Image (cartoon, rainbow, N blue to C red):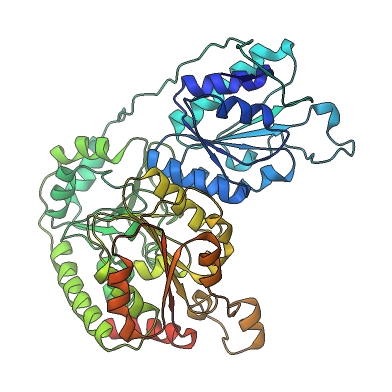
């Protein structure tokens, strides 16, 4: 085995190895050569080469999303590092562990006009859990080792991104056959998560409340014990609202929030207003539930999360710093049945809404909403589903997906910038067939995601191409102007066919409703290469179909 002769490189690779960080995503460069040598020469690491740093970072994000453990990113100096920022901010808000390893020039070469230099130290300070700024030179070996240990342990224990900046002087490519720098691994200390506070005041409030609303944001599959799901589902004083990304299923839950609440009149809003709001999971997609709970505030808002609690509804009263499973393990044995019509009443409304939903789908024109209903109908079971942001995730919210489907979306910052790269990284990390549903702008924005050698044969992409940013037609404002077409909707005539040819994906397309059944069945059938299905829809129809949907539900 060969090693870089740089002691900083040896320290990094040894500590990553000792702490079990196995997956390394490297973007080519010269200044990072010592790290590239250190990782690629060691058989304990699985290395991936991805040229575009923005795509590389989201690719690593997708892998870490699935593994639940840190994935390391390695880049050269200068602006290369800044291309990681969109994925880092997503990781920061979505609690996904990434280790950013940026090569840098020595401090004496910064801000003197040398090429490929920027001020890299603490460059991500607003969206990073920890920054470790190493110093070149043997005199700083123990200091560097300590701050690297600390940063890696933070990524592992606190589940988020950390940045380690590593200056290297030239020459960069020299190697040695034996390690010249022994390091000491400081073990990760994970604090035991337990409820230290007195739950009695909260139990007492719970037991006298007749209207309790549990709102669940982003959750990884199998996050909540089935026992607790079943107990909550049978409590007639409890409503559980879930989103597509919640990955929770029960016939008494409410999986399509906007479908239920969008058509409420004033009396229904008052009747729905909870006494206690209990929230868990990550970011919530539905703007309508946010608006409702801000205007019709609960008396109590409690949030469960081991790290943080956002005051999304401007009434947060308490943060339980624990996991949902530990919280319900303590709470549920102490609750008492409360006579209430809260859940039964809204279940009857849900039943009516679902019926109207099906009726509407049967009569609407060929459109985005029609397409989504067909995709959900013919989608394979036991797959991983990745959803892009903007229109795609919002359409998905109208449907109750099969519980065997694991669903993910970058909702930390809700950007369109790396959805395809994330999905490919997640597909590499998962042994399941992975399907990405994306819009045309999201797909084209991240088209460099296809520029890699790691796309599994069971990876599939559905691009719903309505010729622009269809979501802007749904939002308020004047639609029929040249400025709207150019600067908001951004109309275009680009298709995915040439990208598929260039990157070796099997390509097919749909232009009309009569093609849906046959094409979707074929698309979801097994293949020996990745597939892309492009479905073209009329942009001038989609917004009207969606806006009339809520009136029809009422």
Left or right? Give the position of 231 relative to 308: left
Q: Nearer the viewer, residue 123 or 40?
A: 40
- Residue 534 is situated, as x and y percent measured from the top left of the image, at 44, 73
Residue at image coords 51%, 81%: 473
User: In this picture, is 17 found above or below 155?
Assistant: above
| Badge count | 0
Q: Nearer the viewer, residue 67 or 324?
A: 67
- Residue 139 is situated, as x and y percent measured from the top left of the image, at 73, 10
User: In this picture, is 270 found above or below 386?
Assistant: below
- Residue 435 is situated, as x and y percent measured from the top left of the image, at 37, 59
Quadrant of the rendering where the C terminus is positioned: bottom left
Q: Quadrant of residue 38?
A: top right
Residue at image coords 64%, 10%: 180
Q: Nearer the viewer, residue 10 or 19?
A: 10
User: In this picture, is 239 found above or below 62?
Assistant: below
Residue 269: tell me if it is visible. no
Residue 249: tell me if it is visible. yes
User: In this picture, is 79 found above or below 509?
Assistant: above
Left or right? Give the position of 467 relative to 372: right
Left or right? Give the position of 284 relative to 479: left
Quadrant of the rendering where the N terminus is positioned: top right
- Residue 252 is situated, as x and y percent measured from the top left of the image, at 16, 60
Which residue reaches farthest right?
Answer: 112
């Amino acid at each position: 085995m060969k090693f870089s002769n740089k002691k900083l490189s040896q320290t990094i690779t040894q500590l990553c190895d000792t702490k079990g960080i196995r997956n390394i995503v490297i973007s080519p460069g010269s200044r990072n050569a010592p790290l590239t040598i250190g990782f690629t020469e060691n058989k304990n690491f699985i290395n991936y080469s991805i040229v575009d740093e923005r795509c590389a970072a989201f690719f690593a994000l997708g892998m870490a999303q699935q593994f639940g453990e840190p994935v390391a990113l390695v880049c050269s100096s200068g602006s290369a590092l800044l291309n990681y920022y969109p994925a880092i901010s997503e990781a920061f808000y979505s609690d996904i562990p990434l280790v950013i390893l940026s090569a840098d020039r020595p401090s004496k070469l910064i801000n003197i006009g040398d090429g490929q230099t920027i001020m890299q130290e603490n460059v991500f300070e607003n969206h990073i859990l920890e920054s470790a700024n190493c110093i070149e030179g043997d005199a700083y070996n123990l200091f560097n080792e300590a701050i690297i240990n600390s940063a890696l342990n933070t990524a592992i224990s606190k589940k988020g991104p950390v940045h380690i900046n590593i200056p290297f002087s030239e020459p960069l490519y020299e190697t040695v056959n034996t390690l010249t720098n022994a390091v000491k691994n400081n073990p990760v200390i994970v604090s035991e998560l337990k409820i230290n506070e007195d739950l009695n005041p909260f139990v007492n409030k719970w037991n006298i409340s007749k209207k309790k609303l549990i709102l669940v944001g982003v959750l990884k599959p199998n996050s909540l014990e089935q026992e607790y799901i079943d107990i909550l589902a049978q409590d007639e004083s409890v409503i559980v609202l879930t989103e597509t990304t919640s990955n929770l299923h029960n016939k008494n839950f409410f999986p399509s929030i906007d479908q239920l609440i969008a058509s409420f009149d004033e009396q229904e809003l008052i009747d729905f207003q909870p006494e206690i709001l209990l929230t868990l999971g990550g970011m919530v997609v539905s703007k309508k539930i946010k608006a409702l709970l801000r205007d019709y505030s609960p008396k109590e808002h409690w949030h469960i999360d081991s790290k943080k609690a956002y005051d999304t509804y401007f009434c947060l009263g308490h943060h339980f710093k624990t996991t949902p499973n530990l919280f319900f393990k303590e709470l549920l044995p102490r609750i008492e049945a409360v006579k209430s019509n809260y859940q039964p009443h809204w279940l009857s409304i849900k039943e009516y809404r679902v019926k109207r939903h099906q009726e509407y789908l049967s009569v609407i024109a060929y459109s985005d909403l029609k397409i989504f209903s067909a995709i959900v109908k013919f989608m394979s079971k036991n797959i991983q589903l990745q959803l892009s942001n903007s229109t795609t995730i919002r359409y998905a919210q109208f449907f109750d997906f099969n519980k065997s489907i694991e669903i993910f979306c970058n909702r930390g910052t809700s950007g369109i910038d790396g959805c395809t790269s994330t999905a490919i990284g997640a597909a590499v990390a998962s042994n399941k067939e992975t399907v990405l549903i994306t819009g045309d702008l999201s797909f084209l924005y991240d088209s460099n995601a296809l520029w890699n050698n790691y796309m599994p044969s069971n990876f599939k992409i559905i691009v719903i191409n309505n010729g622009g940013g269809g979501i802007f037609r749904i939002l308020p404002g004047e639609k029929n102007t040249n400025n709207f077409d150019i600067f908001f909707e951004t109309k275009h005539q680009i298709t995915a066919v040439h990208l598929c040819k260039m990157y070796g994906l099997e390509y097919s397309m749909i232009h009309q409703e009569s093609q849906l059944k046959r094409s979707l069945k074929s698309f979801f059938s097994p293949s020996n290469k990745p597939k892309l299905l492009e479905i073209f829809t009329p942009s001038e129809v989609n917004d009207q179909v969606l806006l009339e949907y809520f009136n029809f539900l009422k």
